[in-house]
């Protein structure tokens, strides 16, 4: 009578394994599998038809996909850089505040507390060409004919979305950089003053190198965040007009849920994840280089 | 010629006054040590000279030029900080050359100055390392190197040795003194350690609660302290102080011990004056184990309570009128606690302070 006993460690790990399998592994495998089928939500039987790399081939030659891909990269680049500059500026100013800094810090985080959907609605109203706040202000200060089509013109719409995104998330940079400023030893700054540095030189040669690790951490977090931008865009323009604000995730959701071509949408997902992985690797390299520069471990 | 002059310098933080109108003249090439307990205002004073703190009142002049409103970079000073304050992202070479690079000096001149400073401080081997890869002593040397490459008018040291272990501290002390002998600049040095002050200074400025208590050479402060604070702060072990009262030519110490008033002070004390009688351990020695035989001497029978052998001498703790006093035994022999010994007190080396004002009574 020999029964094979399940090892104890396995039994103990089983709940975790089940949970991870249910929420991560199975959906992951399922979506990967379905990207090799012409799976349409409206016709479940298509799930069983294997088409190999057909979806991927289709994506690689699809101008709409690459337009969305390029637009996402552009969006990411502009938004991250502006958020960095603004966040750095805000953090440097906050660091000088001596009274009421805690309150200010809390206020600074308000935009992050709003649901992105609501932020989207808010800016949709602000930038509305008829009743929007911006056009109203422009008209009331004398530009009588100013009725700019903020959300209708392709470039202006892109600008408006970026504005909303930056408004909502600059504080991520500001808070992380402020944390860096708090952690910064005071002595090297004083040494730099004595060594003859002007305020700008101190910032350029001492403060900034010290902040670089914090900046790259913020960059990594935000690049993942922005690369999957969806809600604000969906609410404000829905990817329009005529797909001029179409980003990867709005394209994917359109393909998957509107056109019901889930197999193709999943294939797009896997291609676009490459983008996030590349950005993450890039910023992590930069992060460890910046840390090594400061003589920190790792 | 670089004198540093402080006239009635005041520092206030809001309502709290940290420095109360200090006057001090420092000569060209002089090594001056500001010493005192924590919170006495010595570091604040140094930072005002450096330009890292605003001056609330009075005037500071470096080389005859009033610098009150000049930023640090226009004062031609350099400073060594307690925590070294090296730039963590730069190599030793870059740390040393940073100030010259900022001043836009030509590359070859920077290289020459850096090599020279590295040579003086023995940093040649470490030039390509980052501060994180250096030991405490090496970092301290880099910090000093960074200060000397610029050939400043004045060096400021802010407790530079307090983060080092005892052995390294002694070693760096010697190096700082050698450095001063080699470069000959004016040095202002802040420490809370009286041994550093004694060993390094041409002149010591002893501060307390934002006031200067006494200025003088190390030996002046040691031999003629102006009050009990100086007497107990300078010298190790601190001076023994025993309360007493003058009556005729006699000094009645607590516990009923009777001593003649030292002849030098006899005309300066009043009958019935309450005093504090001070003497150093070096001047209270067991009979047969003393170094000085001449002079005004009083003998005392005391019981030893504790011994600390130091090699060439043994520190004896003895009971005098219910108080523990310290004495020194030269050419020591083993002494057991509880042993009664006869001591010789060099009366002409003792000090008498007024009990009420704590000021020294001296002719």
Image (cartoon, rainbow, N blue to C red):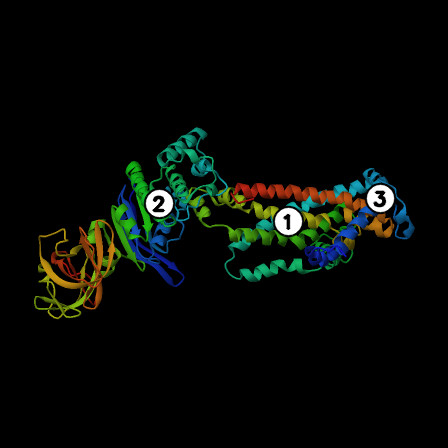
Which residue position holds label 2? B168
- Chain to which mark 2 belongs: B
- Chain to which mark 3 belongs: A
Report whether residue B237 is seen: no
Tell me: B156 left or right of A69: left
Which residue position holds label 1? A83
The secondary structure type at the circle numbered 2 is: helix
Outermost residue, front direction?
A1
- Work out how far the residue at label 3 is from the one at label 2, CA to CA, in angstroms: 70 Å
- Work out how far the residue at label 1 is from the one at label 3, CA to CA, in angstroms: 38 Å
Which residue position holds label 3? A36
Could you say which disc has been placed on residue A270 in the image?
Answer: none
Q: Position of residue B230 (x, y in %)?
A: 24, 57
Asked if badge 3 and badge 2 are on a common chain, one would say: no
Q: Position of residue A254 (x, y in %)?
A: 83, 50
Q: Nearer the viewer, mark 1 or mark 3?
A: 3
């Amino acid at each position: 009578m020999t029964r094979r006993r399940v090892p104890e460690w396995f039994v103990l790990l089983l709940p975790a394994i089940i949970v991870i399998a249910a929420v991560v592994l199975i959906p992951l495998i399922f979506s990967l599998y379905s990207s090799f089928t012409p799976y349409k939500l409206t016709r479940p039987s298509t799930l069983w038809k294997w088409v190999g790399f057909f979806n991927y081939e289709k994506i690689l030659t699809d101008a709409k996909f690459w337009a969305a891909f390029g637009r996402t990269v552009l969006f990411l680049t502009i938004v991250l850089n502006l958020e960095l500059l603004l966040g750095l500026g805000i953090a440097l100013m906050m660091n000088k505040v001596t009274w009421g800094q805690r309150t200010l810090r809390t206020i600074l985080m308000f935009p992050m507390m709003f649901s992105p959907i609501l932020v989207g609605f808010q800016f949709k109203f602000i930038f509305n060409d008829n009743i929007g706040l911006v056009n109203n202000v422009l008209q009331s200060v004398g530009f009588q004919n100013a009725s700019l089509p903020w959300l209708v013109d392709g470039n202006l719409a892109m600008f408006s979305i970026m504005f909303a995104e930056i408004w909502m998330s600059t504080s991520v940079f500001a808070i992380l950089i402020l944390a860096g400023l708090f952690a910064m030893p005071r002595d090297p700054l004083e040494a730099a003053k004595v060594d003859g540095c002007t305020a700008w030189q101190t910032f350029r040669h001492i403060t900034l190198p010290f902040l670089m690790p914090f900046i790259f951490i913020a960059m990594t977090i935000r690049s993942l965040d922005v690369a999957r931008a969806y809600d604000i865009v969906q609410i404000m323009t829905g990817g329009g007009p005529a797909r001029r604000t179409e980003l990867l995730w709005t394209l994917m959701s359109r393909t998957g849920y509107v056109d019901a071509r889930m197999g193709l949408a999943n294939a797009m997902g896997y291609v676009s994840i490459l983008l996030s992985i590349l950005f993450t690797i890039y910023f992590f390299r930069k992060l460890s280089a910046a840390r090594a520069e400061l003589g920190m471990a790792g | 010629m670089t004198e540093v002059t402080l006239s009635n310098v005041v520092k206030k933080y809001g309502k709290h006054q940290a420095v109360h109108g200090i006057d001090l003249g420092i000569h060209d090439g002089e090594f001056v040590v500001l010493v005192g307990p924590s919170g006495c205002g010595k570091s604040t004073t140094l930072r005002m000279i450096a330009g890292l703190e605003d001056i609330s009142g009075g005037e500071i002049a470096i080389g005859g030029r009033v610098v009150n409103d000049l930023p640090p970079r226009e004062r031609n000073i350099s400073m060594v900080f307690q925590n070294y304050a090296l730039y963590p992202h730069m190599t030793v070479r870059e740390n040393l050359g940073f100030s010259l690079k900022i001043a836009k000096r030509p590359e070859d001149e920077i290289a020459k100055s850096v090599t020279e400073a590295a040579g003086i401080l023995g940093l040649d081997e470490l030039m390509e390392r980052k501060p994180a890869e250096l030991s405490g002593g090496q970092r301290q040397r880099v910090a000093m190197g960074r200060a000397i490459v610029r050939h400043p008018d004045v060096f400021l040291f802010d407790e530079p040795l307090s983060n080092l272990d005892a052995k390294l501290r002694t070693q760096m002390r010697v190096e700082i003194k050698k450095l001063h002998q080699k470069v000959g600049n004016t040095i202002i040095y802040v420490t809370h350690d009286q041994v550093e002050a004694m060993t390094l200074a041409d002149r010591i400025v002893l501060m307390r609660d934002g006031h200067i208590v006494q200025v003088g050479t190390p030996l002046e402060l040691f031999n003629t302290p102006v009050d009990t604070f100086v007497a107990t702060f300078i010298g190790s072990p601190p001076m023994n102080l025993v309360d007493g009262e003058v009556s005729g030519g006699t000094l009645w110490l607590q516990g009923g011990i009777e001593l003649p008033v030292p002849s030098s002070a006899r005309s300066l004390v009043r009958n019935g004056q309450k005093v504090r009688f001070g003497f150093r351990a070096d001047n209270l020695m067991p009979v047969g184990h003393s170094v000085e035989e001449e002079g005004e001497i009083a003998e005392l029978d005391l019981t030893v309570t504790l011994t600390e052998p130091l090699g060439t001498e043994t520190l004896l703790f003895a009971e005098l009128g219910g108080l523990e006093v310290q004495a020194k035994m030269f050419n020591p022999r083993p002494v057991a606690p509880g042993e009664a010994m006869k001591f010789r007190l060099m009366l002409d080396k003792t000090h008498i302070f007024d009990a009420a004002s704590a000021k020294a009574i001296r002719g």
